[in-house]
Image (spheres, rainbow, N blue to C red):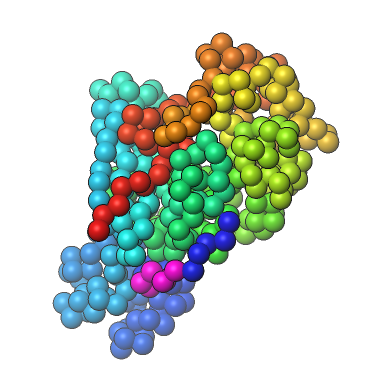
């Protein structure tokens, strides 16, 4: 779970706190107001190239580009699906490690595959290169953990996505366990919500169940949505599907999720990948309802997000039968548990949940 030691990425403007940005411009011999100018350009405009910020002196632009705006992520490959409304990008980091992010547009006029409703967009981004959680049905986990991303590298994925238009939602459901990279996650969240103006309520942080960090997140004053990747209502099965369960068992993980709801007022999402004949039995749906509503919690604090298992190379498992999926939903609804089945966008380009692997390397 602990990231291997690696050379730190170059320091970026997005890695600095607001006070540190002011100190940086003063140290460079620039007036204090330049920090606000730079913030507005990078965090609030579509451009990430200081050379295009023409209200700054040319010498200042060059100095900024060299010192505070190194290239953190470089696109290696872009794939599209769903008539171009799902875009998966393979990024190369400064040290050759690879990550992936997926931009999904919904409600695009004239494109039926983008779904109904208002026009909106969601970015699924990565918080680590690889993942150390080793969940056997997830392609990312099978490759192991290379290293944590810096706050700047996380923000860079958001910045790249905003070049194509405003973002409505950001989900930390790409490569990595966000709460295992806690310090950089929090720095990135504060930049995204404070400097970039994204709504915390439009950001979802997913975790496989790192209980101490879930409790810590509840105290940060960041009303993001917490998503707990549960995948089984009992320890025996979850020990296999989500190995971190051997350290933080089901009751502890669900208890921490409920504590998050109590502290923030934000309803928690329970992620549950439906795997044929493994965790999709009707009795497990009943057990899940008992678990979530137990200890007097009721059902109003939680929403279950069922995910049809997406295929990954070498996996011996597959998605549930439609009839079993429908029965699972019905059992939860009967117990007054809010439940939806996730749309599997980007499956054909390995861009759906559990498929990100960044398997292509470039010399």
Please say whether residue 274 is visible from this viewpoint. Answer: yes
- Residue at 25%, 46% (x, y): give it: 77
Most common secondary structure along the magenta stretch: loop
Q: The C terminus appears in which quarter of the rendering?
A: bottom left
Q: Is residue 261 above or below residue 288?
A: below
- Residue at 51%, 28% (x, y): give it: 316
- Residue at 38%, 69% (x, y): give it: 9
Q: Residue furthest top?
A: 323
Q: Viewer-proximal residue, 38 or 185? A: 185
Tell me residue 55's x, y (percent): 20, 71
Please say whether residue 46 is visible from this viewpoint. Answer: no
Q: Is residue 204 left or right of residue 213?
A: left
- Residue at 42%, 71% (x, y): give it: 8
Q: Residue furthest right?
A: 295
Tell me residue 51's x, y (percent): 18, 69
Q: Is residue 220 above or below residue 166?
A: below
Displayed quadrant of residue 196: bottom left
Q: Is residue 80 above or below residue 265?
A: above
Tell me residue 203's x, y (percent): 50, 46
Displayed quadrant of residue 347: top left
Q: Which residues are magenta?
A: 6-11
Tell me residue 149's x, y (percent): 44, 60
């Amino acid at each position: 779970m602990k990231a291997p030691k690696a050379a730190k990425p170059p320091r970026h403007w997005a890695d600095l706190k607001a006070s540190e940005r002011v100190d940086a411009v003063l140290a460079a011999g620039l007036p204090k107001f330049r920090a606000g100018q730079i913030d507005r350009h990078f965090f609030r405009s579509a451009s990430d190239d200081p050379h295009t910020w023409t209200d700054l002196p040319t010498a200042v632009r060059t100095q900024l580009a060299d010192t505070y705006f190194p290239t953190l992520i470089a696109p290696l490959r872009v794939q599209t699906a769903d008539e171009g409304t799902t875009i998966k990008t393979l990024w190369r980091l400064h040290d050759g490690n690879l990550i992936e992010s997926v931009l999904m547009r919904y409600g695009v006029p004239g494109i039926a595959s983008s779904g109904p409703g208002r026009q909106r967009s969601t970015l699924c981004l990565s918080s680590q290169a690889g993942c150390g959680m080793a969940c056997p049905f997830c392609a990312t986990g099978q490759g192991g953990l290379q290293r944590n991303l810096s706050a700047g590298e996380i923000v860079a994925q958001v910045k790249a996505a905003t070049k194509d238009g405003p973002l409505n939602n950001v989900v930390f459901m790409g490569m990595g366990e966000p709460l295992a990279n806690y310090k950089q996650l929090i720095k990135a969240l504060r930049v995204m919500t404070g400097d970039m103006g994204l709504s915390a309520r439009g950001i979802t942080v997913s975790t496989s169940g790192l209980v101490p960090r879930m409790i810590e997140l509840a105290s940060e004053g960041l009303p993001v949505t917490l998503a707990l990747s549960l995948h089984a209502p009992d320890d025996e099965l979850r020990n296999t599907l989500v190995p971190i369960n051997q350290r933080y068992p089901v009751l502890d993980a669900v208890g921490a999720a409920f504590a998050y709801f109590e502290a923030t007022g934000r309803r928690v999402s329970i992620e549950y990948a439906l795997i044929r004949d493994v965790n999709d039995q009707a009795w497990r749906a009943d057990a899940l309802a008992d678990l979530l509503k137990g200890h007097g919690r009721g059902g109003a604090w939680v929403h279950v997000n069922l995910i049809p298992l997406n295929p990954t190379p070498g996996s011996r498992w597959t998605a549930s039968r439609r009839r079993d999926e429908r029965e699972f939903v019905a059992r939860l609804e009967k117990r007054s548990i809010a439940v939806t089945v996730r749309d599997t966008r980007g499956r054909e380009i390995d861009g759906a949940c559990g498929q990100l692997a960044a398997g292509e390397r470039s010399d």
